[in-house]
């Protein structure tokens, strides 16, 4: 905290560099994981989400389309399950 209990302003250029470093680190981590591990993580995430009451009771679920080539988790199976269960209601 700065004088008077105020938080000092961060240097925008420093903040941008920090964000770029974090993003570069995350990209490197995703590349290093491998597609088999990403698929396993994706499945665990889908299973966990399906077990949550708020997800089970939701009328809509927002998801993102994965960039598989960049190693992002793939939750499309959740989309498929939610879509099919909506038609059964």
Image (cartoon, rainbow, N blue to C red):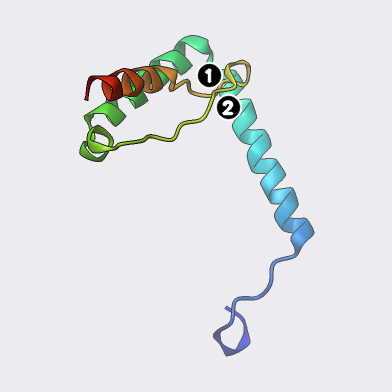
Residue beneath the point at 23% across and 19% down = 88
Image x and y of residue 36, in percent: 46, 9
Image x and y of residue 10, in percent: 69, 67
Residue beneath the point at 69% across and 50% down = 18
Task: Kindly state the secondary structure of the residue where label 2 is placed.
Answer: helix
Q: In the picture, residue 76 is in which quadrant?
A: top left
- Using the numbered discs, state the Cα–Cα distance from disc 2 to disc 1 in whole angstroms: 6 Å
Which residue in the rendered view is the most extreme toward the bottom? Answer: 4
Task: Kindly state the secondary structure of the residue where label 1 is placed.
Answer: helix
Which residue does the numbered mark 1 point to in the structure image? 33
Image x and y of residue 68, in percent: 57, 17
Could you tell me which quadrant the N terminus lies in? bottom right
Which residue in the rendered view is the most extreme toward the right? Answer: 13
Q: Is residue 45 shown left or right of residue 4?
A: left
Residue beneath the point at 27% across and 27% down = 50
- The answer to the question of whether label 2 and label 1 lie on touching residues, with beta carbons closer than 8 A, is yes
Q: Is residue 85 shown left or right of residue 41?
A: left
Q: Is residue 33 shown left or right of residue 75?
A: right
Which residue does the numbered mark 2 point to in the structure image? 29
Image x and y of residue 64, in percent: 51, 30
């Amino acid at each position: 905290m700065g004088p008077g209990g105020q938080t000092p302003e961060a240097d925008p250029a420093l903040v941008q560099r920090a964000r770029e470093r974090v993003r570069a680190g995350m990209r490197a981590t995703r590349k290093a994981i491998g597609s088999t591990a990403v698929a396993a993580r994706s499945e665990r995430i889908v299973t966990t989400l399906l077990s949550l009451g708020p997800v089970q009771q939701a009328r809509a679920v927002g998801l993102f389309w994965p960039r598989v080539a960049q190693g992002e988790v793939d939750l499309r199976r959740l989309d498929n399950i939610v879509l099919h269960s909506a038609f059964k209601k």
